[in-house]
Image: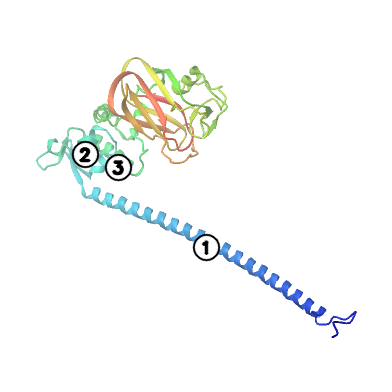
Amino acid sequence: RLRGIPGKNVGGPSTDGMLANRNESTSLVDVARSLQTRVESELLRVEQMRHDAEELQATVQRDRASLEEEKRFFAAMNKESADIVRVNAGGKIFQTMRATLCQVQDSMLAKMFSGRWDESLKRDESGAVFLDVSPACFNVVLSYLRSRTFDPSAKFPDADVPSELRAEMQAFLKFMMLTEDEDDPELDGSLFTLARICGDFCGGRTWNHCNTDVHYNNKHFEDILRGVVPESTPEERCAIYCGVHWRRGTTVDPTIEVHFPTPRRVRGFKVMVARESGCRWRVLKDGLVLYSGNPFAYPGGQRLPDPKHNPRILRFHQEIVTEKLVIIIDDFQDNIGFYSVSFF
């Protein structure tokens, strides 16, 4: 048998066949790569669609929550609107919503018309609640309370009070606990001294900017709290900051203890805000919690439009007589800043 002839390829694959196989293999690799590219592209598209769907779902949930909140708000307004109160002020009948008369929380007027004392209130023959005050005075007060239903920061319109009624107006406002604390002569930062500070505080400006490299001694800290920092003080040393992003490992919550020179009656405090955020302030007397809440209204850090006029006025749960108070700040969501505290 012939097993082959030199130079000839007998019975084996031809060169053309091998080239064909190679081309076919290359073609399959290209197809596989193309398919892989398409698959990866589809996976990215699907992932983007999933992300878009999640965002859409979150938007729908937010819109639904906002709609429910609006429904509750208008339902509450309708309920309040139905509760109309008639007041006989010095012989003239006024009609308003109960909620309007309760605009100033913790005032005597709000307590009178809270609904708990309706049976005890003095009334005229028609059933209207009688207040022994000049109609002109009550008209100004009612106008002020109505303004607060739309703008809680509305100020009392002193210019609208006739000169001959100013003494009666001031007496009525004081009795009804409607006087604004900013005008209270007792609202004076010099009436206390700094007894103790602990926890992490740092310096900063009175406008939304802390400086973790600045730390105060007790004297400068006290000057800021009392609002007596000299005008020549550098901007970075005019406010007090504390929060979560720069704590130096201490486990002690930021704490301030102030002392009064003699026992004094205290109903609340005012703090001037440098930076707002979520946190909790607690004011205590010998362990008794007089106030617990967030005077810094926003859940995230907020830039303030006017750093010189951002007071938060807060009333204690009860009026007390004391020589010292302790302020504890905790539950931070971000850094917060303030630059003076005063008591009334």
Q: CA distance from mark 1 to mark 2?
A: 53 Å
x then y, percent, for residue 70: 34, 53
Q: Quick one: which residue is furthest to the left in this view?
A: 125
The N terminus, quarter of image: bottom right
**Circle 2 sits on which residue?**
114
Label 3 crowd (10 A; few <14 / some 14-19 / many >=20): some
Disc 2 packing (10 Å; few <14; some 14–19; many ≥20): some
Name which residue type carries label 3.
Arg
Q: Are marks 1 and 2 in contact (CB under 8 Å)?
A: no
Say which of marks 3 and 1 sits in front: 1
Q: Is residue 288 visible?
A: yes
Q: Residue at x 67, y 72 (%)?
A: 31
Element at label 2 = loop
Quadrant in which the C terminus is drawn:
top left
The image position of residue 238, as x and y in percent, is: 52, 26
Task: State whether residue 150 is above or below residue 17.
Answer: above
- Which kind of residue does numbered mark 2 sit on? Ser
Marks 3/1 in contact by CB < 8 Å: the verdict is no
Q: Decide: is 278 above or below 172.
A: below
Work out whether residue 69 or residue 11 is closer to the camera in this orientation and state it.
Answer: 11
CA separation in Å, label 3 and label 1: 50 Å
Determine whether 1 is above or below 284 in the image.
below
Would you say 41 lies left or right of 87 here?
right
Residue, x 21% and y 39% (percent of image)? 114
Q: Which residue is mark 1?
A: 49
- The secondary structure type at the circle numbered 1 is helix
Q: Which residue is mark 3?
A: 146
The numbered mark, 1 or 2, whose residue comes first in the sequence reads 1
